[in-house]
Structure formats: C-alpha cells, structure tokens
Image: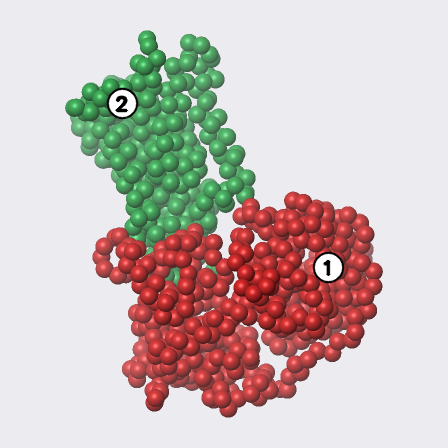
Amino acid sequence: MGWETWLIGTISRALAYGTPLLLGTLGEIYAERSGVLNLGVEGMMVMGAFSAFATAYTTGNPWLGLLVAACVGGAFSLIHAFVSITLRANQIVSGLALTMLGLGLAGVLGRGWEGKPLEAALPALTVPHLAKIPGLGPSLFVNQNALVYLAAGLAVLLWFVLYKTKIGISIRAVGDDPATADAMGVNVFRTRYLCVLLGGVLAGLGGGYLSVAYRPAWTEGMTAGMGWIVIALTIFAFWNPLLGLVGAYFFGALYHLSYRLQPWTSPELLKTMPYVFAILVLALVARGTLKRRMNAPAALCEPYIRGEE
Amino acid sequence: MAKSERLEMRGIVKRFPGVVANDGVDFTARAGEIHALLGENGAGKTTLMRVLYGIYQPDAGEIFLDGRPIRVRSPAEALALGIGMVHQHFRLVPTLSVEENVVLGLREGLSPFPHLRRVRERLAAIARDYGLEVDPRAKVFELSVGEQQRVEILKALYRRVQILIMDEPTSVLTPQEVEQLFSTLRSLVEAGLTVIFITHKLDEVLAVSDRVTVLRKGKVVATLPTAEADKPSLARMMVGREVVFRLERGPAKRGERLLEVRDLQALSDRGLPAIRGLSFELYAGEILGVAGVAGNGQKELVEVLTGLRRATKGRVLLFGKDLTNRSPREIAAAGVAHIPEERLRRGLVPEMSVAENLVLKGYRDPPFARGPFLDQRAIIGHAEEAIAAYQIMTPSPNTPAKLLSGGNLQRLILARELSGQPRLIIAAHPTYGLDVGATEQIRGLLLKQRELGAGVLLISEDLEEILSLSDRILVLFAGQAMGLFKAGEAALEELGLLMAGARSGKGEEASAG
C-alpha cells in the first residue's frame, strides 16, 4: 500500500469520524457563546444515537432516524436549559447529570436492540465529477455520507451567523455581558434557550450519525467519550465554528490513526490519544490568564439575574 | 429663543424598603438646556432619572413629554420616546467592536444583517457634528474610559434621543477629557437636545449647566438658573449646612523611609503589563497621593503592595525588609493597613456581623482568641468600643455588615485597619461614593494618622482629594510614574496632561491595556 493511498484513507476517515465531533462542537460553541456550559453533550449524543437507530430500524428510514435524534437531543438540552437558565442552578452539575441520565437511559432502553444489524443505513455517496480530482477527490468526495458535507456547510454558516449578523452580535453580547445585552433590549433568556437548544439538536444529530451512518448498529456506550472530546474541542477552537471544523477533523484523524498504527504499537495506548489531547487542551486553558486571553465568553457558567451586577 | 418645557416630572415618589428615595419630586427640563441635577450620594438624583429611563416604576407621580403624559415601563420604551441615559457604569460589551455595540439591540428593519457600513457612516457624521471621534471598528476593551464614554453618547445619539441623561459623567475623566465632554454637551444643546447632568460636584454645575435643580434627601430644595447660583449657596442647599472647603493640615513631619518600590512590574488580570517599571519611596508622616485615570495600574499597584498580586519583577521594601510577593498576612502583620477599593468584596465579609468583621485581622490572637476558641465577650466588647469611637451607625454589633450604608462600611473598615496603630496605610479610593459628611470624617482620620507618624499611600481618582490631602503627588499613567510633585507645586492643568500620558504638550503615547 503506497503512502498516497494511506494518506487518502486517513483524510477520508478523518472526515467521517470528525463529523459527529464537528456537529457536537458547533452546538456546544453556540451554547457556550451564549454563556451556558453544557457538559451533557455525551448524554445528548448517546440518546441521539439510540433514538436514531431505533427509529431507522423500525421505519426503515434513516433520515427519519436523524430527525428523531435531533428532536431527542433538543428535548434533552431543554432540561439543562430549564435547570441552568430558568432555575439558575449550577451549570456543571446540571450538565453532568444530563450526561449520566442520557447514558443510563440509552443503556436501559437499548437492551433489546443490541447487536441488530441496521439494513436501512444512510447510504454513503460519491460526488460525481469532484471525485475525479486526483488526490483531493478520493479523499474528500468518495464514499462519504451526506451528513459530512452538511456538517461542514453548517460550520461555515454558523461562523457567518456568529460574526456577521445581528443575531450573532446578540449571542456574543449575551455570553460576554448579559446585563448590558439586557439593557440594550436583547432577550437574554430567549437567546440562551435557543443556543442551548441548538446545541442539543446538533449533539443529537451527531449521535444519530454514529448509529445510522458511521457504524450502522447500536451498542451501549457507543459514543465512547465523544461528548467530552467535544467539550475540549470547543475550547481548542477558541469558540470559533471554523476552527471547530479544523479541530474536529484533526481529532478525527487522531482517532483513525489509533487504528492504523495498531500493528506497530499497543492499540490501548493509541486509543487514549484523542483523550490525552483533550486533557492537554483543558489543562492548558484552565490556567486563568490564558483562558481570558483566548476570548472565552466572559459570562460562561454565570446565571443571569436581572438587576444584580 | 423661548425655551419650552420639554420634560415635566410631577410629584414623583419612589420608595425602597426602609427609604423614600424620591419624595414628591417636581422636575422640568427644556429643549436646548443643560440641566444639572445636584445632590449628595443618596439624595435621589439617580433614582429620579432611573424612573424617567424606565428602570424603576414610580409609586406615585406623572411624567409629561412635550405636554403629553407618558408612562415609561422599560429602557427600550424610554429610547423609543427619545430618552437616553449614559450610566456611571457603562453598558458596553467589551469584546464587541464600537459599531457592534451601537447595533446591539437595535430594531431597525427586518434584515438579519447589520448594515455596518451604513452604521459607520452615520457614526462618522454624528462624531463630526459633536466632537465624538472614536474608531468604529475598535474593540471596546481597547478604548480608554473617555473613549468608552463617547461610545455611550454615540449609542444614544444613534438612537435619535432628544433627552440625554448623563449620570456622574466626569468621575472617570481627566480634566482635559472633562473639558472635551463639556464642549460636546454644549454642541448637543445647541442642536436642540436636552441634557440632564447628574453630579455632586459644584464646580461642574457652575461650569456647564444652564439651570440647576438641587435634591436633598429625596426632595427638591430649589431649581434656579445657574447664573444666579454660587458655590457656597449651592453647597448649603445640597448639604443643608455650611461646608468647610479647606481641610486643616499641619506641615509635614517627614520621618524614616517606610516603603521603597524599586523597578516594579506586574501583570493585569488580562495578562498584560499593568505596572511597567515603577519606583518610588514613601516616608513616615506624609501622605503620598497617587493621581491617575482609572485603569492605569492603580489597582494592580495596591494589590502588589498588599500581597494580593504577584510582582513579576522589581522589589517592594517595607520598613527596610524585602517583602516582595509575601502573603497578605505577613504584610499586614508587618504593620500595613489596607483600605481596599471594593468595600464589600475585599474589605469585608458581607454575611458576617459587624463585630466579626472588626476582628478579621486579629481573631487569631488574644484577647479575641483563647487557644482554638474565640472569646465572644471580648469580640463584642471590642466592637462596641469601635462603634462608638468611629461613629458606625449599626443596629447592633451582631448586624450583618452587608446591611450597613457605604459610609458606615468604610468607618467599619477604618476601625479595623487603624486599630493596632499601622505604620503604613494603603488607602484606595477611600471616599468614593460617600456623602459629604462621611468624606470629611474619613479624610480627617487619614490626616490624623499622618500626624501620628504613619505613612499614607492615597490612591484616588478625585483630583481635589489628592490635592487637598497629599504632601507629595505621584502621577501614574500606563503603569509608569509620569512625575512626582510636592504639594502646592502641582498645577491642575499639568497634572491633567500627565494623567493623559503627555510629558509635554499633547502626547501620543498609548495606554497599555
């Protein structure tokens, strides 16, 4: 096998594996930009994965499965939104609870579905014409899912919305300085709710992609810590959707490499690579000064109460 | 030009638990005038304007705009009616650019895209008309405080306000910036706007306003044309008694060297250089005033000297010993008292009682501690003495500190910090937000410490305070010493220029941060 084939395979798989990470990260970027940290990504993703699989298996329609996954993810995120925005509870505790709830619930509900093959998987497609470009074509446009391109397009769109539209200005204002945003007539609660909801929808979609497209089957805990990588990626991307795109594919490549390099090193060690990176990123930004310099949303994790400054 | 009453507020009553902030206030303002609203802190000026701006709902009273009755339920409604307010604490998102801040919350058309180019053009036109130049694409955190204030005014003008309320706008400005602000305000009223200028500074009333309304304890004392007013009469109306403007101050008896700062450097919270090679000395029996516009390293300097922030370079010698980067406890034990900028966050534990707050520094040692236990009787006894000696108005020694007013909080802090005869007192904005009575008392206490031979490092944005208390004045700009003056040698204009970073004439040196 030549190095070219090897590289093409790696890039292709990096996109495939990076896509659920990207979807989750885009959602988490929006939630955090509005000032709400949602550590429930893992729970929302796994619920998305299960509900997508169950729906696609029952109805035979993978697209319907994805739609249900998005709705379930969104519904799950509303629990977090209600607890942390309306009740102003601790966002970290609420998010962790959501992850545990999701993992537990999907585990219980999914017992009878374990190991069943999904006939109605989302078909991989090859883009005509573009696939013929030497090098680039086979790595980007052959045997990929529609969702891969949808996610990449979404990254660009969400970047544009965040930086170039009034909505984006409002979101950034709410996450950085909710009191000022409120004084200027921006509805802080609505903005935060919508951003958290978007986060849930995208996390659910990412989970659904895993079980109806990436690996069409259901196994308990199949998200395997992806939700945590999403949290790290969000910071890694400086809360910027386009950098999120780069980061997600980078982690996708890391994950793929951990399989490809198995013949030479311990697979257990390699599998830890994405997580080691995630920990490194988190440790790096946990240092106060760096965190501020990296333009983290200033009001992240702070519930907003009108009239308290 | 006949000036009609544009705004009329009649019989405004606003009650808060335990206080009547506005007690039947009548207030009018005309098109084309700067109307000063004068009063001490707590007189009800800001409350009255917050009622007008829709932040508070009045308990009684009516508001008329151009003769028509109006109800203002929120700031958004106020803006829609053409009433804008520039708050003391700016309502700007630091991470957004100037134009983004202007657009924020604006409901202009249905398009989701902000027409930033159009915004930029209109901002430029407004800026040209009223002398409010600021780069529309700069991020707000990169701007000086004076520029941020200009953005606030621009924001209001962009929303086409006819009445502009300015709440204590000069407290954060250098004398030159104050002049510039005044000329902006004058050109605004020439264009037919109404400016309501909240202040407690008499000189500003006389310098800029056309009419003045004096408030005291929630009631209007008088409304009169500024031309018919003078400083003593306004002061009498504001305070309700004669006010002494000059403090009694004996000649300095300079003693040994207490504090030596050598080539000090430190970073700000954002990780940027905040103190950049600062050196000075402070002697026993003197008050060294540090003048400067907020955000030029004063906060960081105080924190480094009291052990709350690490110095990245340089040395701090206290009483001849190197105490650079020692813990706050060691520094306090050496005889340094700290009167911090943020009373409730740094100076006191709000939930704890007055008595407990009074022994925060001494609770480990007798007479307050007996072995591992606290001696409640000694603590309460000490509190009762301190309450009497410093005239702290509190229902009891067991009252939580957070229920006390600003002046009493400050007396409480001073009572604690000055007990045990400190050798060096670091006082950050000691009279900020206090009424005239409390201010006089606090300044008197600092002067008394000076007579007793302590050294005082006085950090203040109030130039009058610096000038009337200090024996020497250090001007701080961008974390560096711009000059050191003896009292009486410093002219206000020169200080102002140095505070703005100009060594001679108009300097171009940019502020770091």
Q: Residue at x 54, y 43 (%)?
A: A289
Secondary structure found at label 2: helix
Q: Is residue B263 visible?
A: yes
Q: Residue A153: image x %, image y %?
A: 26, 36
Q: Which chain appears green?
A: A
Q: Which chain appears red?
A: B
Q: Residue B210: image x %, image y %?
A: 45, 84
**Relative to B362, B37 lies left or right:** left
Using the image, determine if residue A49 lies above or below residue B139.
Answer: above
Q: What kind of residue is marked 1?
A: Ala
Tags 1 and 2 on a common chain: no
Using the image, determine if residue B221 lies above or below residue A179.
Answer: below
Using the image, determine if residue B103 lies above or below residue A9.
Answer: below
Colour scheme shown: by chain
Q: Nearer the viewer, residue B387 or B312?
A: B312
Q: Chain of mark 1?
A: B
Q: Which mark is residue A136?
A: 2
Q: Which mark is residue B337?
A: 1
